[in-house]
Amino acid sequence: MDFKRLSLCMIVKDEEAFIEKCLSSTKGVVDEIIIVDTGSSDRTVEICKSFGAQVIEFPWNKSFADARNFGLERATGDWILWMDADEQVDASDVYKLRDILYSNEDILSIHLINYYGERPEPEKTFDIVHTRLLRNHKGFKFQGKIHEMLNVEEVLTIPEDGLIIKHVPIKIHHYGYMNSVTENKKKFERNITMLKEELKQKDYSPWTHYHIAAEYYGNEEYSKAFDHVNHSIKDFLMRLHTPPSLLYRLKYSILIATGSIDGAWPGIEKACILYPDYVDLHFYKGLILYLKDMFKEALEVFDYCLEMGEANLQYLTQKGVGSFQALHYKGCCFEKLGQIEEAARCYAMAASQSKSFNSPVEALRELMTKHQSLFSPLTADCDDQTLIAMALNLNSAKNK
C-alpha cells in the first residue's frame, strides 16, 4: 500500500491563546502543517514554528477565501485537513485521520461541535457535520470573502437527488463562539462591515443576508436580523432554490425571542413540512404551541422531538432539543394542565440528563413550594439530587 500524506492547512492572526492546543491535537498524525499568517503581532508565528509548521506571510486583503486558498495551493499531501486556530481534534478520534487517507471519496465531513456560553460545557453546543477533509489536486478551493465555502458543486458531479457527502466519525471541538472569544475579537463589527461590502457586489450570494441576520441576532438587534433573514429567503426563492434549513431556524428563533408568536404561527408548520427530519424546527413548533396555551398539542410535539433525538447531524442542531430541553417543556405543559406528578417526573428526567441546564431543578423547587404534601418529608433545603430522585419515583410510589 502506498504511503499517503496528510496536510493541515490553517489561516491565523494573533491566535496565541488557542494555537498551541489546536496544533497539539493533531500532533503525530499530520505530515505537514501549512500556516498562512495574515499579520500576527503576538507569539502565534513562534508557536507554529515550534511544531515544525511552514509559516507563510499573506498580506490581509479582506478575503478569507484568498488566504485559505493561498495555503491550499502550497499543500503537498494527498489529503488536506483544514481547521481554525480555535478548534481541536478530539483526542479519541485523532488517529482515525490516518484511516481516511485511503478512502475512495474525494471529500469528507466530520462532526463539528460548536460551544457557546461562558465556558465549554457538553450540554451547551450546536452540532453539525462539516466538510473538513478533501483530496488534494482535485480543484477544491474556497469562495466568498467571509464565511467562505468550498466549491464542491464545481468539482464533483452532483446526482439528480443531490449530493450527500460521507460523514466520518471524527469530532472537532470549536470554541470560537464562546462569549469571551466573540467579545475579545470584536467579531460582530468586523463581520458586519465585511458582509455589507459583499452586498455591494452584483452577484452576491443569497447566503450574505443570512449571515448578516445571524450577526444581528447574536447582537440582539432582532428587527434588523428579521429583515435580513427574510431577504435571504427571498433571494433563494428568486434563484429557484429551496431556502436552506438554517434560514427557517433563524427566522423562528427571532420570532420566539421577540415574543412574536402570532407571527410565528402557523408558518412554523410549513417549515416543519419542508424539513420534516429537523428536530430544532419541531422543538420551535412545540414552544410556539406552548406559548399559545395549546398545551396538549405542544405535548405531542415535544414527544415527537424526543422520538427524533439529535442524531441527524445534517442540520445544525442545538444539544437538548431532542432530549433534556424537550423533557423540561413536557414538564411545563403537564404543570399547566394540572398533572403535577407527571410534570415533576419530566423535570427530574430533564435534570438527570443535563447538569448545566438549571431550569428543570428550579421548576422542581417551585413545585415543591406549591405542593408541599406531594414532596413530604423533603424540606426546602434538601439537595438537588435528593429532590430529583424523589420526583422520579412519585408515580411508582403512588402505584404501590
Image (spheres, grey):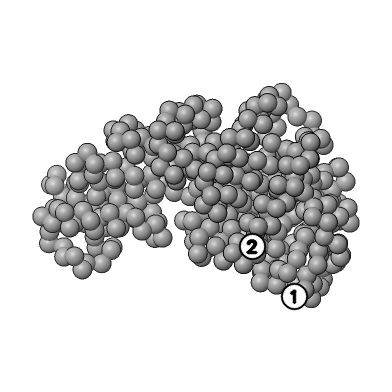
Camera-side residue of 161 and 151: 151
The residue positioned 61% from the left and 32% from the top of the image is: 233
Residue 29 seen in render: yes
Q: Nearer the viewer, mark 1 or mark 2?
A: 2
**Mark 2 sits on what residue?**
186
- x and y, in percent, of residue 174 in the image: 61, 58
- Horizontal placement of 268 versus 142: left or right? left
* Residue depicted at x 44% and y 44%: 258
Q: Secondary structure at mark 2?
A: loop
Classify 155 as above or below 43.
Answer: above
Q: Residue at x 38, y 40 (%)?
A: 287
Q: Position of residue 141 (x, y in %)?
A: 82, 45
In the image: residue 277, left or right of residue 109: left
**Percent coordinates x, y for residue 341 in the rendering:** 20, 46
- As drawn, which residue projects farthest toward the left? 373
Residue with the mark numbered 1: 42
Residue closer to the observer: 236 or 315: 236
Q: Is residue 283 something one can see in this rendering?
A: no
- Where disc 1 sits, the SS reads loop
> How many numbered circles does the render carry?
2
Q: Which mark is residue 163?
A: none
Disc 1 from disc 2: Cα separation:
17 Å
- Relative to 29, 271 lies left or right: left
Amino acid type, mark 1: Asp
Contact between labelled residues 2 and 1, with CB atoms less than 8 Å apart: no
Point out residue 332 in the picture as x, y percentages from the top left corner.
Answer: 29, 45
Tell me the quarter of the picture where residue 43 sits: bottom right
Q: Is residue 264 above or below residue 349?
A: above
In this view, 112 is above or below 285: below
93 or 217: nearer the viewer: 217
Disc 2 residue type (three-letter): Lys
